[in-house]
Every structure is written in C-alpha cells, then in structure tokens.
C-alpha cells in the first residue's frame, strides 16, 4: 500500500498589513503556534494565562482538568471549564450536532497529532461513535458516562484568544493581534485604518485568496489543509463529521468566521465546515448567531455572507 503522509500545521491566517511600532512574539502552546503582535514586549502575565488554559483544556495531558473530568461520571470543574463545556454543548444543539464536543473518543482514534496517523478500522470508528452520549450540565456539575470524552479542541483556542485580549487591554495594550493556532483576535483599530487579515489559499500554502478588514473582532478559520494526511490518494483531515465518524465532506475546503466572540468564531468555523455552504447559510439566515463568514468551495469558488468585510485579491 502506497502511503504518503503529509502533516501540516500552518497559521491559517496571515497578517497582510501591520502598523509601525508593532512587534511579534511567538510562543508554542496547545500543540500550535501562538503569536502576539503588540506595541512592546509580551507581558509575563499573558504567558501565564496560556499555561493556565493549557492545564485546563487539554484532553491528552493527565494533569489537565479536562482530562480529570473526562475520566469521571460526575465532576465539579472550575467555573471556566464548566462555562466552556456548557457553551460547547449549547452550540452542539444549535448546529444540529455538526459541532460536537463529545467526540473525544473519535479524535483519540484518528489521532491527527501523531507522527504516523492512519485510517482507523470501521469497527473502531463505530465503537467511538457509540461513546457519544448525553452530557448533562447543571448547578456547576458535569454528568456523563465515563466513556464520553469531551474534546474542546474546536472552541478552546478562540476562547483563549479572547481571554488574552481582555488581559492585554486591562494591562494597557490599546491595539494588537493575537493568533492562537489561526484563531485571531484583532483589536484597537478604527474604520479609517482597519486591520487586514489575510485568508490563506487552501491549496497554495504561501498565497492568500484575499483579506478581511476588521477593527475589533475575532476571526477563526477551519480548513482541510491544517492537519491532514493522504492515504491511497485520499485526503483525511482533522475536522470530523460526528454523524459518520470520518473527516467531514461537505463540499467546503475552508471556512472563516468573523464574530464578536472568540469561542463562537472558533466553534462555528468548525461547525460550518461540517454543515456545508447551504446549511451554513440557513443558520446565518436564522439569526441564532451573529456572525459573518467566508467559504471556499472544493472547486476554489469563494462565497461570503453579505457583511463579511472580505476583499478578494
Ligand atoms: P478546528 O481546527 O477549530 O476546526 O478544530 C478541530 C479540532 O476540534 C480537531 O482537532 C478535533 O480535536 C476537534 N473536532 C474535530 N471535529 C469536530 C467537530 N465536528 N465538532 C467539535 N470538535 C471537533
Ligand atoms: Mg474551530
């Protein structure tokens, strides 16, 4: 069997214009690159925040709070972990299960962070799907079957970008950009001179398809080119369809979501990728969430919601 493995982890968004006086600081965390573009040095407190959240939200670190919660049937997590699990479950319901934080057993099975990822056996995929069952959150407690593994990988990075933004604003930083593995927070500009955030071409790594203008907001991109491998000519990427157990095949290869919440942008970019263009536009039209989006279809066509702020090349 000919097996070609390519595993890419690229920042999915690039900054195409920067104001003078800004410096970039990159640190590693949560299995990805985290870049702060700020006026001045990165304060120690920001790094400490990242460590705190890494210990809170990791599914794989035995010392992490989420890991502990995942091993139990009933648990009272910290208020922040409880709130993010609650928000994740709510988004799961409102996206009709396209976004589902209960799929940790499935993520573990596919293991896209391994050096040698492989297509799991169908029977193992079915077994992992059976483990997706009810998680109840009430009065600060999380109740579930101990086999259900919660995975916050599609919402936590955006949440962290938002928390870092609040911290920096409270500590005197008036403007800047934070990228947590491609989940961007851009803050402190006005309409005369907005940030320009480039959207990567999903099939030509070094180029962009255009950019989004934003003054204060969050942008997250989910694409089939961030973490993937190719086996017998088939691309297997890390965004899973919780209904099939396989990488989502919705006709989209990249989705960028813009909103006023980091966690929501992150979760919705994953959800819309799974739902596909038509269902995404239905969700947009329903008004359940306030967001804008830029879609790249399989054939390279770009579609946007009316107020996305996207400017093509
Ligand atoms: P993102 O890069 O934000 O789209 O998130 C992808 C990560 O979230 C994956 O690496 C998995 O850990 C997890 N994930 C994959 N598919 C889903 C899904 N449909 N719903 C929720 N989380 C998911
Ligand atoms: Mg996401």
Image (spheres, grey):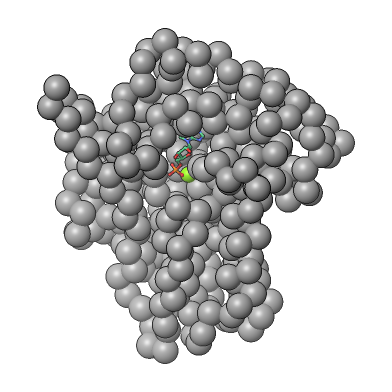
Q: Is residue 53 visible?
A: yes
Residue pictured at 49% horizontal, 75% vertical: 176
Percent across and percent down for residue 131 are: 58, 18
Residue at far front of view: 62
298 to the left or right of 134: left
Residue 295 against residue 42 in the figure, above or below: above
Counting from the top left corner in percent of width and height, residue 199 is at 31, 56
Front-most of residues 156 and 6: 6
Q: Would you say 194 lies left or right of 128 here?
A: left
Q: Is residue 254 visible?
A: no
Q: Quadrant of the C terminus?
A: bottom left
Residue at image coords 63%, 65%: 49
Judge from the rendering whether residue 239 lies leftward or rightward of residue 286; answer left or right: left
Q: Residue furthest left?
A: 2
Residue at the location (19% across, 46% down)? 203
- Residue 3 pos. (x, y %): 17, 30
Instruction: Check the image and report above or below for 26 versus 274.
Output: below
User: At 42% from the left edge and 89% from the top edge, which residue is drawn?
Assistant: 21
The quadrant the N terminus occupies is: top left
Please state the total of marks drawn on the protein image: 0
Depth check, front residue: 233 or 96: 233
- Could you tell whether 87 is left or right of 280 in the image? right
Q: Position of residue 217 (x, y in %)?
A: 52, 62
């Amino acid at each position: 069997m000919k097996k070609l493995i390519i595993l890419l982890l690229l920042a999915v968004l690039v900054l195409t214009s920067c104001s003078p006086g800004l410096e970039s600081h990159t640190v590693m965390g949560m299995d990805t690159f985290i870049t702060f573009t700020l006026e001045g040095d990165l304060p120690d407190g920001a790094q400490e925040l990242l460590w705190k959240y890494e210990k809170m939200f990791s599914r794989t670190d035995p010392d992490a709070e989420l890991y502990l919660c995942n091993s139990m049937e009933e648990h009272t997590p910290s208020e922040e972990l409880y709130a993010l699990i609650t928000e994740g479950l709510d988004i799961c319901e409102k996206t009709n299960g396209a976004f589902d934080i209960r799929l940790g057993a499935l993520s573990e099975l596919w293991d896209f962070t391994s050096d040698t990822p492989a297509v799991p056996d169908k029977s193992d995929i079915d077994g992992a799907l059976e483990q997706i069952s009810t998680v109840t959150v009430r009065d600060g407690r999380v109740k579930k079957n101990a086999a259900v593994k919660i995975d916050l990988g599609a919402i936590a990075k955006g949440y962290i970008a938002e928390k870092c933004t609040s911290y920096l604003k409270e500590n005197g930083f008036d403007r800047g950009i934070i990228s947590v593995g491609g989940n961007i927070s851009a803050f402190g500009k006005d309409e005369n001179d907005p940030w320009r955030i480039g959207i990567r071409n999903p099939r030509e790594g070094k180029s962009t398809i255009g950019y989004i203008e934003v003054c204060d907001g969050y942008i997250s991109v989910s694409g089939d080119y961030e973490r993937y491998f190719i086996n017998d000519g088939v691309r297997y990427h890390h965004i899973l369809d919780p209904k099939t157990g396989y990488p989502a095949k919705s006709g989209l290869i990249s989705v960028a979501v813009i909103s006023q919440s980091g966690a929501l942008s992150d979760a919705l970019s994953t959800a819309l990728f799974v739902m596909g263009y038509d269902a995404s536009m239905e969700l947009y039209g329903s008004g359940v969430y306030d967001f804008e989006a830029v879609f790249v279809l399989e054939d390279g066509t770009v579609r946007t919601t009316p107020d996305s702020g996207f400017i093509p090349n």
